[in-house]
Amino acid sequence: MGGRNLKFDNTANFSSFYFPLLLILLLIGKDWWDDFALHRGILLLEGFIFFRLFTIWDRPRTIFFLKSSVLFFILNSCFLIWKIFQDPSFQITSYHEDIFLIPVSLLASNALLISGVSVIIWLEPKQSALQKYLIVLAVTISIAFLGITISRNSILSFVIFVTIYFLFLGSPKRKLFGSIFVILLFALGIYILFKSEKSLFSLGTTTVRLSIWSFYIFATIKSNPIFGFGMFPENKIPFSVTDVSDTNSAFFIRDYILNFKSFPLAHNLYVQGFGSFGILGSLFVLGLFVSIVYKKRHSLGWLWSHNSAICCLLLVWALHELYDFNTLEISNIFLLIGVFALIEFPRDSEKLENKFPLSKYAVALILVALIASSFRFSLVEHFTLKYSKFVMPHNFEFFLPKNINSQQADIAIPARSSWEYQFLGNKFFFLNLATNPTKAAQADLIEKCFQYQLLPAICYSKLIKYQDQYQVLPEFRNLSEFLLSLYDPFEIYKRESL
């Protein structure tokens, strides 16, 4: 809707448009089978499109987009607050995914960004009284969510943002109000910590994070050093290295898997990026950042002085990503792109020699990628809802069958051809496997599993269950378990370990 009646620039830069677009489309094609990785690739493509829009929009339109985001945050918060008050046993704690519907780290990082965006909007001229009230309300709700989630990293990042901006970059009046605000915030934080089960000085989570980071780096260098594991490395890295030499790290990683019933998440955007893109991709991203800084080296002081609040927020976010959940998982990516688009650059003479006509084929390629992925996700969700009473979702295997009865065989998902399974991806494939109880159909699907899956651990797990259920070649069950152990060092697909 934001693009209605919008006159696009009829030229595009090769290095900033065509080349990144090609890389993103290659990532999407590479990760097409993996639903979670494909979600991230599509989100990256949408972020790229929004960045293109933001570079064309004028500043008031981008500010309007950010104001709308803050408003929707307030509206969404009303539903969350209502759900909190509906729970009579609710207390300040760190685990409320059933209420928030996203991990607490994501909610806290979103609150951190919203509070920073609200400060930036407050500094814009021509704010009505209603808009200022809404900004104050958004900041208040953000602080409340930071307190409820007890995300220490996000709380510390917010305090650093407030301290830098209000105490070191502001006017004397702003420093006074900032000092009062920081003192009140500090007192509130101490009070909440006493009411929480978390300890500010506990280093247990740091040890787990360090173990996961070292394993991510080690596994990437050993298994996929050049191009990495794709956009969702979490579900591939635990199976990529069978000889885990660091027993202490292995203990913490296995403990993480058991406690959270999830693949080990990096909680570090840069380590996760290294696992996704490998050495070559990481060097490319780093080289791109260094080249941009080098080109703007003479205007860095000017950029900081004219964009102090924006630069401060982006700097704090970059530090925040060293220790917390990847905040680009959700719509934070659009907030960050909108904030970045507000940066005022000194007027440079525009160079036209590197610009090319904006190709209609590139626009058509973007539309095809978005339409195809939307159709694929919609169709898979349709079947997921249709057969939901026969399966239960599972983090590691997507779906597990419920009590199988005679009627389920009559309404099982019809068999698909190989290209249909490859187009619809692994989530649909394992939904089909969970809803189809017949012996012949399961044998055929397990055989296809070994053909499609890059990492065969889950296939060996399905094979063992198939052998137990139908007593097929029971003398080879020990061999199947041995092969599973070769590909599953953390015993993720041994049901008794979870």
Image (cartoon, grey):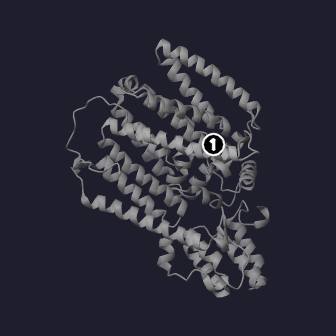
Q: Quadrant of residue 324?
A: top right
Q: Label 1 amino acid? A: Ile
Residue 26 in the image, given as x and y percentages of width and height: 41, 60
Image position of 221 (left or right of 406): left
Give SS at disc 1. Answer: helix
Image position of 416 (left or right of 82): left
Q: Is residue 101 above or below residue 467?
A: above
Q: Is residue 202 visible?
A: yes
Q: Is residue 411 above or below residue 284?
A: below
Q: Residue at x 38, y 38 (%)?
A: 64
Badge 1 crowding class, 10 Å Cα cut-off, few under 14, some 14 to 19, many 20 or more, is some
Q: Is residue 264 above or below residue 404?
A: above
Residue 94 in the image, given as x and y percentages of width and height: 71, 42
Please state which of residues 210 and 133 is positioned toward the viewer in this rendering.
Answer: 133
Q: Residue at x 55, y 57 (%)?
A: 232
Please state which of residues 67 and 19 is positioned toward the viewer in this rendering.
Answer: 67
Q: Quadrant of residue 89?
A: top right
Please state which of residues 331 and 135 is positioned toward the viewer in this rendering.
Answer: 135
Residue matched to label 1 = 81
Quarter of the image where the C terminus is located: bottom right
Q: Residue at x 51, y 67 (%)?
A: 33
Residue 156 in the image, given as x and y percentages of width and height: 62, 31
